[in-house]
Amino acid sequence: MLATKSRPRLPAWRLGACALATLVLAACGGGGGGSDAQSLSGKGDNTPFEIRTLSNRADLISDGDALLEITAPPGTINSGVLKITRNGADVTSAFTPTAKGTLMGVVTGLVNGENVIEATVRGGPGARLVVTNAPRSGPVLSGAQVTPFYCATPQPVAAAGSTPATNGSGLSGQPDANCNIGTEYKFYYRTTATAGSGAGQCSTALPDPVWNSNGSTGVIPAAPTPPANGCWKAYTPGSTPSDMATTTTESGATVPFIVRVERGTLNRGIYDIAVLFDPAQGSTALSLQSGWNKKVYYSFGSSTGQPRRQSRTTVNWTSLEEQLKRGFLVAQNSMTDSSRNSNRVMMSETTMMMKEHIIDTYGQVKYTLGTGCSGGSINSNMNLSIMPGVLDGVITTCTYPDSETTSLEVGDCSLLVEAYQKPALLSLWSSMSLTQADVNLRKGAINGHLDQTACQAWFNLFGSNGKAGVFTFRQVANQTTGAIVNVGVTNNCELPNTAVYDPANPVATASLPRCNAWSWAESIWGKVPGSPAANDTRDNAGVQYGLKALRDHAITAEEFVTLNETVGGIDRDSTARAARSTADLVALPIAYRAGIVASGANLAKTPIMDLRGWDDSLVPANQPLGAFGVLGIHHMWFSWAVRDRITRDFGDAGNQVLWRWSHGNFSLPPGTMGLEALAAMDQWLLDLTTSPSTASIEQKVRDTRPASTRDFCLHPSNPAVRDFDTAACDADPALKPSLSPRQVAGGPRSEDILKCELKPLDVADYGDVTFSPVQWTRLQAVFSTGVCDWSRSGVGQQAAISPLTFMAGPGGQPLPAAPVSTKK
């Protein structure tokens, strides 16, 4: 079914502790309270009469319900004289007295738009709060949703002409026009079998596997079957299976290892929420399940994409057994999976909506911990930057700072990989009688990596991700020579090729969907005047590829000039062209203001644990002892980009923990490191959220950092011993961060300059390198408007003022002050 359309060093931007928690922290009033005290008892009592939302700001509520707390005059809470209404309807019965002398309750039935909540004492004073509610399907603040968008169905449906196939939702209900599907609950128990693939062991695969159709061909695969030896089995409440395991929670209670899985839709994504659950107990926001530790473990899915089809989340709750057994509530949503959604504001909005739903449904939380690898690390960090306060801390692996600046290396690598196969460079290298090994050394020096494979890996995995419409997929077929072959014709929307924009036929297909990240997020970027294409931040004007390699004499002046003559750029469809890529100037300040370029100032406010494994090369000879470099794109330098941004914007990176290793799998911390990180972060967040300090949030984060989170590395020569000497870790070739093509071109390691300011060519910038008059003339022709001046901030670069709301249109506006209740 088709969803209808819904309506020089940057100065650090600092907020106080309560201002930071703009979105969700109830300690600062939850966005809904006021401090308008008045004498109510006639005895000089200054108790404020106020209404507060506890699950989110009062103007960012969604899905028709909200957890509220009411402070009323002494003697009125249990007297029967207090009346609470929602848009005039009496909802007093929804509220229950609390131990601290307030009333708390979940108000349901909120209409879309403004709702008036009133609490009054019969014949006396009262309070009034306006609560603004958004629909379950969103949006709340990310602006108009992209269309067309194809809803998932109970079972996949085959494509029909230009109408795409649908994915299986994992739900029995049919979607409505906005992709809302009825929520369902299922119980599962953990068996006593040991997880593994050996005899008598069980599979941790989902008991209800994901069922997706093929997006480009529309082929429906055979219906999946649950694992025959699943670790998790369906549970019938009241039964006692003989193979049911038990677990001991953080409170010390030993309970049957039963979880309830809630599956539903929110912001057009399909979510799973799993938590220890006793079916004999009730469960509301005011009557919590005893097995839940009031902590949320939120997982963000990996990769990157922008398909126009609703699907289930890519994160399996069954993979989070260690969290579940300790009592964590684990949650994920397909719209917070990087492979399913490249609108990072909408992704952060979805995280906010999920957290609100959890609080409204399960109860108030102690903290929310975000986690993910690769694209999941992007979404973890971007939440901290785009909507500070939604996540209280993050643990990431395979870390990238954000999607917008990671795309700098992807784009540069893709251009370089193509340039290396063009006649100009091939002929030059041939004339120099270079061996293939010699050529590859040059490629590595220009790329900034150990060898040529890191850029080739980017090219193969994500080099086509920015393609706006139908394209011919190209792939490096030989990692040694870099030879490229055409594989097939496809698109990034997961739609039939006939149903998307075609750059080869731009006029006839102009109204069809565009499939790159900027068009997927056109509510954020806006459209190019007079064009259906979205504004775009990609730019390489003035970038001198191979500059450091030239200065280091790893390449010659002729190679440098030829490279920069040859590399070219792309247009907004990602079609190659001789001219350099140029960003739409209007998009650049949006990227910074909205926190889409991850802000060091915002990152400085949250505990960050970065578990960095090695994945820097696909050449076996260049891989450290015991390394498992399977993708070759998760380069170590990205962790230092995060650190450099925090240090620049705040002064130190004392909130960022860096544990690194080079043996084993880059995405799986070796030994007990993962569990140790979880335990350390748990202590950190509990100390932080209960700290009575009045210091800034940045300082509180640093003051509460546990000693167990000291930076360390594991050397490949002795991976059993932790080295806490940062200098020794940095000196190890297996742990030393490499560079990126743009850093080789002179850019900062923070890698957050989308478009550089320019300066004239100056021969003094090249050290002892000598250009012939002809070479210098050619270089002037390439850089006729100048070269990058990396001593200056980027074009449009500015401090983040996130969160922004895009409900009034692209570009975004700062949120106003959080609503507070007023006297009635």
Image: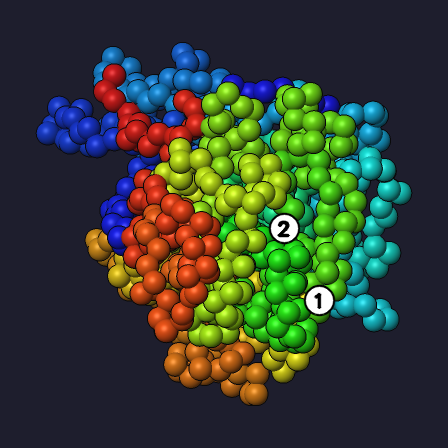
Question: In the image, residue 515 lies at what x, y percent?
Answer: 63, 35
Given residues 715 and 50, the one toward you in this image is 715
Farthest residue in the bottom direction?
A: 717
Front disc: 2 or 1: 1
Left or right: 251 as drawn, with respect to 624? left
Farthest residue in the front direction?
A: 773
N-terminal of the pair, mark 2 or mark 1, is 2
Residue bearing the label numbered 1:
481
Q: Is residue 624 above or below residue 271?
A: below
The number of numbered discs placed on residues in the rendered structure image is 2
How was this image coloured?
Answer: rainbow
Q: Is residue 716 above or below residue 294?
A: below
Q: Amino acid at mark 1?
A: Thr
Disc 1 crowd rating (10 Å Cα; few below 14, some 14-19, many 20+) is some
Given residues 503 and 692, the one toward you in this image is 503
SS at badge 2: loop
Is residue 276 something one can see in this rendering?
A: no
Residue bearing the label numbered 2:
463
Q: Amino acid at mark 2?
A: Gly
Question: In the image, residue 806 lies at what x, y percent?
Answer: 42, 28
Q: Quadrant of residue 97?
A: top left
Question: In the image, residue 629 lies at what x, y percent?
Answer: 65, 70
Question: In the image, residue 383 lies at what x, y percent?
Answer: 45, 46
Farthest residue in the right direction?
A: 222
SS at badge 1: loop
Q: Quadrant of residue 435?
A: bottom right
Q: CA distance from mark 2 to mark 1?
A: 18 Å
Is residue 541 something one can see in this rendering?
A: yes
